[in-house]
Amino acid sequence: MAKRIAFITENFLGSTLPLIRQLCKRGYTIDLYIYRREVHEPEACELDYKAEHYGINTIPRQLYSGILDYVGCNNLNVFTFSQIKPFASLPIVRNIVSVIMAYQAHKAAKHINAQGYEAINMIGNYSMPYMKHLLHYLEGNIIVSLHEVWNHAQPSAKPSVLLREAINKRCKIHVFSDNSLNDISQIEGIDMSLVYVNPFGIFESFASLPEAELEISLPDKYILFFGYILPYKGLSILHQAINLIGK
């Protein structure tokens, strides 16, 4: 019987798909749960889908044929976990929304737990508190991968909501760099024996996209920045790098 692993993420497909590809090539069956109601052209791949109902929805395989071609086998199944949006202004409304989210997460976790996965890898960062409900109810060998431990613009030793849940459940925690390892070592209540570093692989999932001709002309020398420019990414480091390149 093939070993099965579940990946649960809202974003980060650009770095997650190469890992899935390698696992599929080694004979694993992978179930990918995308934490969204609507999926529209996620990072580094093509996929358009709107969930039919709250909870877990199976995405038809023909909608991610490019991803399957990239993976190179049929060992990948893609789902969405659709949940009520976590926004509210009044305390009483927030409380009601939180109860509904917890109920939806409990049902989804019950389904996921029943699959008997060898491992469940939840991938997120410090700013995804709404994923805590699902993490709370998941069982088994759970790994929480964090792209960012804290907001680099406003570092804080107080753990985020999602990280606090991982700490309380004594989950294995995966970070992608020694810098993040140093960051997380300063978090209150962290057990560093459960934390490990596994660097990013090659960001090659763009290979699942169709080729297209570039319609603009480029100078002989240019800088291509591929990603989001947001304060928590560490814009001061980007500024230093550009100054060095300029010199």
Image: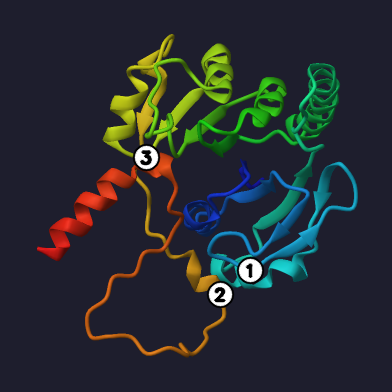
Image coords of residue 147 (percent x, y): 45, 39
The amino acid at mark 3 is Phe
Looking at the rendering, which quadrant does residue 166 occupy? top right
**Residue density around tag 2, few if under 14, some if 14–19, many if 20 or more, within 10 Å:** some
Residue shown at 86%/21% (left/top)?
A: 96
Q: To which residue does mark 3 refer?
A: 176
Q: Is residue 39 above or below residue 138?
A: below
Image coords of residue 237 (percent x, y): 26, 46
Nearer-the-camera pick, 231 or 148: 231
Q: To which residue does mark 2 refer?
A: 209
Residue shown at 67%/45% (left/top)?
A: 1
Nearer-the-camera pick, 129 or 81: 129
Q: To which residue does mark 1 refer?
A: 46
Q: Is residue 55 left or right of residue 185?
A: right
The amino acid at mark 2 is Leu
Q: Is residue 245 left or right of residue 123?
A: left
Instruction: Check the image and name the residue furthest to the right.
Output: 53
Residue shown at 59%/18% (left/top)?
A: 165
In the rendered image, which quarter contains the C terminus? bottom left
Q: Is residue 239 left or right of residue 128?
A: left
The amino acid at mark 1 is Glu
**Residue density around tag 3, few if under 14, some if 14–19, many if 20 or more, within 10 Å:** some
Q: Earlier in the sequence, mark 3 or mark 2?
A: 3
Q: Is residue 188 above or below residue 234?
A: above
Q: Earlier in the sequence, mark 2 or mark 1?
A: 1
Nearer-the-camera pick, 1 or 43: 43
Image coords of residue 169 (percent x, y): 58, 15
